[in-house]
Amino acid sequence: MLSISKMVSGRAETGDHLRYHQRPQAMGPVVVWNSTRVCNLKCKHCYASAVTRPDPDELTTAEARRLIDDLAEARVPVLLFSGGEPLLRPDFYELAAYARERGLRPVISTNGTLITREVAWRLKKLGVGYVGVSIDGIRETNDRIRGYDGAFEAALEGIRHCVAIGQRVGLRFTITRYNYREIETIFDLIEREQVNRVCFYHLVYAGRGSRLREQDLTPQEKRDVLDLIYRRTADLCARGLEKEILTVDNHADAVYIYLKLRKEDPARAATVWEWLRKSGGNRSGIAIGAVDWYGNVHPDQFTMNHTLGNVRERKFGEIWHDTTHPIVAGLKNRKPLLRGRCARCRWLAICNGNFRPRAEAVTGDFWASDPACYLTDAEIGLGEKENTEFRIQNSEDGVKALGLSGT
């Protein structure tokens, strides 16, 4: 995740300790647990290809409690309950409470349609740290993408219940050609509804989302969207409205906004560079991992075609640190494996090769360039000076020599 609001304002935000500070070596990753594949909607971009009926082979309550024990042992700081729709799992509240008891911070990613006032209160009393509600447009646009008439109004009502009782809540919006023209309206909505956070997700070609590749934006459209997000975020900050505005799943955003800041405010850009360098770009397989409904461990929730092991057979921590698996080892030190533009990019220190599932979906090669990178060859340092820049790109002296630090 990239916080545009932090880059603009410089203020401290909720996830700073996980994103921009040196992680203790023993700390485990943030884990997304796709606790069920069942969902009451049928979203066009669903990476999990959710279904309408529960699978009898999903982790049982007892197995899920053992998983939470394993995650606590592995020093996982945050457990994100996802799906499908996690509120459809009958033991959700029991497991969220158990995660809290074991020292994990439980958060939830939901379509919001099942959040009544009573559900909102239960989430708050359980100590759920954050409720992320997926909304992909206003009314008809959202309902068309989510495959259910009335989904927008139901999700908005769920958000209002959370806001009314002080439960921290935010929006999750996946950017596609279907809805990108409504981003302006989404900013209006979060201000009007007093929502304190919105995450704009770039499309990942996984699950049903793999069929939407042609609905991804062009490079110029992506740049235009980032300009809009930056402008609206700067406006919110200038008016003293403390909203967290983030983009997710495309680390070209970090470079694009950083370059914008270098022109507008070099001193701020130097500070932002240090944050981005500490964050390190894409951290799938490093600081984020996923477990699916069967207990299979994956590098992230979008890379379910690569299974690292199963928690029914081995503890999560053993699987996560087993570098005999080529994907595990590769993601922890991917720079020598990257190919194409990613391999020659001057921004590897803050991008780390962007998102591997898109590269594999388009080329069949897990280590190929991410096709969703919208930076130009000139911006990433390709050209007559390419060889010199590539040799020095990852050294501290090299960063200064290339003028990348903002100083």
Image (cartoon, rainbow, N blue to C red):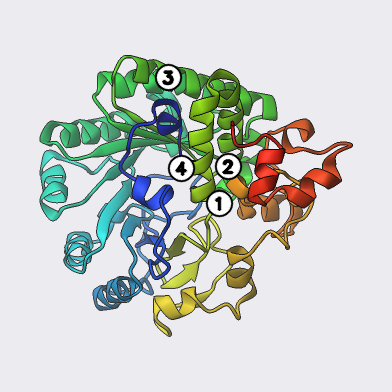
Residue appearing at x 11%, y 36% in the figure: 165
Q: Which residue is mark 3?
A: 234
Dot placed on the residue nearer the N-terminal end, 1 or 4: 4
Residue of label 1: 282
Element type at mark 3: helix
Label 2 crowd bin: few (<14), some (14–19), many (20+), radius 10 Å: many
Determine which quarter of the picture holds residue 237.
top left
Q: The residue under label 2 is which amino acid type?
A: His
Q: Residue at x 42, y 49 (%)?
A: 19
Which residue type carries mark 1?
A: Asn
* Secondary structure type for disc 1: loop
- In the rendered image, residue 18, in percent from the top left (x then y), is placed at 38, 52
Give the foreground label among 4 and 3: 3
CB within 8 Å, label 3 to label 1: no
Of helix, strand and loop, which one carries label 4?
loop
Crowdedness of circle 3 by 10 Å Cα count: few (<14), some, many (20+)? some
- The residue beneath circle 4 is 43
Percent position of residue 7, x then y: 45, 31
Q: Against 386, is 291 above or below?
A: below
Q: Residue furthest bottom?
A: 313
- As helix, strand or loop, the secondary structure at mark 2 comes to loop
The three-letter code of the residue at mark 3 reads Ala
Q: Quadrant of residue 170?
A: top left
Residue corresponding to mark 2: 251
Q: Earlier in the sequence, mark 3 or mark 1?
A: 3
Which badge, 4 or 2, comes first in the chain's sequence?
Answer: 4
Q: Along the polypeptide, which appears first: circle 2 or circle 3?
A: 3
Between marks 2 and 3, how big is the CA–CA gap? 20 Å
